[in-house]
Image (tube, rainbow, N blue to C red):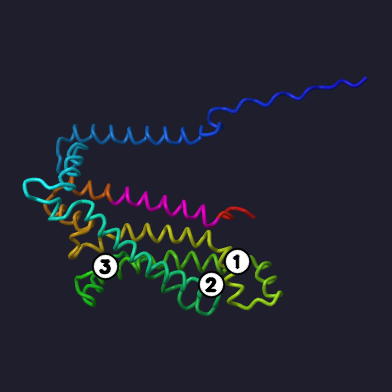
């Protein structure tokens, strides 16, 4: 006699695994973390009672309103609105990053495919990557003056090494079996690089691009040290001279939040353009 046992009904999904549950949980955790940071900031400012050292959140908010509007005939900060300062800096970051990323891609592909070139250029790229931006910004000012050119050069040089290193490592580490199969089918070096090596290297290259944009963001204040107004970095440097800590904090928030936005755009593009990332 055979006894049939009915299968157990599937367990109900928990809140964390239910559709949307993970997203809601992450949003709630982030909100609580931001609330905790705000309360810590407000409490510390009240205890210190020194707005020059730690301005309260209300002072930074007031500066946001002041620098974004015209009050008593004064337009924003140094004659430019906050959005204009940020827009000029973002334009410099985008142009400088684009030049550095293109140069890093070309150099990285050459380093990854030509052995002797990799041996020659790798120490130079590592040397440049180790230099702080201010170390060579003064040299660019001597060469190009104080206009836009030295700023773009600084951001380009800062963004190039991460892309070059990531691209060279990814191209050099392309799957040997796929490369040999492509060559066995009659593909030349350029065809193999275009159709096999670069698609397999794109995930690592995209990581290098995100790092390059982050380095350019961290270098914008240095790039706008000289003649940087309008510019968010120039605004920060100018406010620092007059101990306007609330304006400095506002500028840091502007750079950080815009950086988060651009990084999220890059991650979305990465997910759309490289769906095979993380798959065998």
Secondary structure of residue under mark 3: helix
Q: Is residue 53 above or below residue 18?
A: below
Residue span colored magenta: 255-274
Q: Name the residue carrying label 2.
A: 112
Task: Tell me, yes or no, whether the two marked residues, 1 and 2, touch with CB atoms within 8 Å.
Answer: yes
* Residue furthest out toward the left: 72
Earlier residue among tags 1 and 2: 2
Residue 128, magenta (yes or no): no
Characterize the magenta stretch by its predominant secondary structure.
helix
Residue appearing at x 53%, y 62% in the figure: 202
Report, in whole angstroms, how far the alpha carbon at label 1 lies from the one at label 2: 9 Å
Secondary structure of residue under mark 2: helix
Residue 100, by quadrant, is bottom left
Q: Position of residue 73 (x, y in %)?
A: 6, 49
Report, in whole angstroms, how far the alpha carbon at label 2 lies from the one at label 3: 29 Å
Q: Position of residue 104 (x, y in %)?
A: 43, 69
Residue appearing at x 60%, y 28% in the figure: 13
Residue appearing at x 56%, y 32% in the figure: 17
Secondary structure of residue under mark 1: loop
The mark found on residue 279 in the picture is none
Q: Nearer the viewer, residue 124 or 78?
A: 78
- The crowding category of the residue bearing disc 3, from other C-alpha atoms within 10 Å (few below 14, some 14 to 19, many at least 20), is many
Q: Is residue 57 above or below residue 120?
A: above
Q: Is residue 5 above or below residue 165?
A: above
Q: Name the residue carrying label 1.
A: 174
- The crowding category of the residue bearing disc 2, from other C-alpha atoms within 10 Å (few below 14, some 14 to 19, many at least 20), is many
Q: Position of residue 255 (x, y in %)?
A: 29, 52
Q: Name the residue carrying label 3.
A: 151
Earlier residue among tags 2 and 3: 2
Report, in whole angstroms, how far the alpha carbon at label 1 lies from the one at label 3: 35 Å
């Amino acid at each position: 006699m055979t006894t049939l046992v009915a299968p157990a009904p599937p367990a109900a999904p928990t809140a964390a695994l239910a559709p949307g549950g993970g997203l809601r949980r992450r949003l709630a955790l982030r909100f609580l973390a931001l609330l905790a940071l705000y309360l810590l900031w407000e409490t510390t400012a009240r205890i210190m009672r020194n707005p020059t050292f730690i301005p309260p959140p209300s002072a930074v908010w007031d500066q946001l309103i002041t620098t974004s509007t015209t009050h008593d005939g004064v337009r924003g900060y140094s004659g430019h609105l906050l959005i204009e300062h940020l827009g000029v800096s973002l334009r410099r970051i985008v142009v400088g990053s684009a030049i550095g990323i293109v140069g890093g891609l070309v150099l990285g592909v050459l380093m990854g495919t030509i052995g002797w070139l990799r041996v020659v250029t790798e120490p130079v790229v590592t040397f440049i990557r180790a230099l702080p931006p201010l170390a060579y910004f003064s040299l660019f000012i001597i060469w190009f003056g104080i206009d836009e050119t030295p700023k773009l050069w600084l951001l380009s040089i800062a963004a190039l090494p991460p892309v070059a290193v990531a691209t060279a490592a990814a191209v050099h580490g392309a799957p040997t079996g796929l490369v040999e199969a492509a060559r066995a089918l009659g593909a030349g070096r350029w065809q193999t690089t275009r159709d096999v090596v670069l698609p397999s290297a794109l995930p690592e290259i995209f990581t290098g691009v995100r790092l390059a944009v982050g380095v350019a963001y961290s270098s914008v204040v240095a790039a706008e040290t000289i003649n940087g107004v309008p510019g968010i970095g120039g605004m920060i440097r100018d406010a620092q001279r007059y101990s306007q800590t609330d304006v400095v904090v506002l500028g840091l928030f502007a750079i950080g939040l815009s950086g988060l936005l651009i990084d999220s755009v890059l991650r979305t593009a990465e997910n759309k353009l490289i769906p095979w990332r993380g798959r065998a």
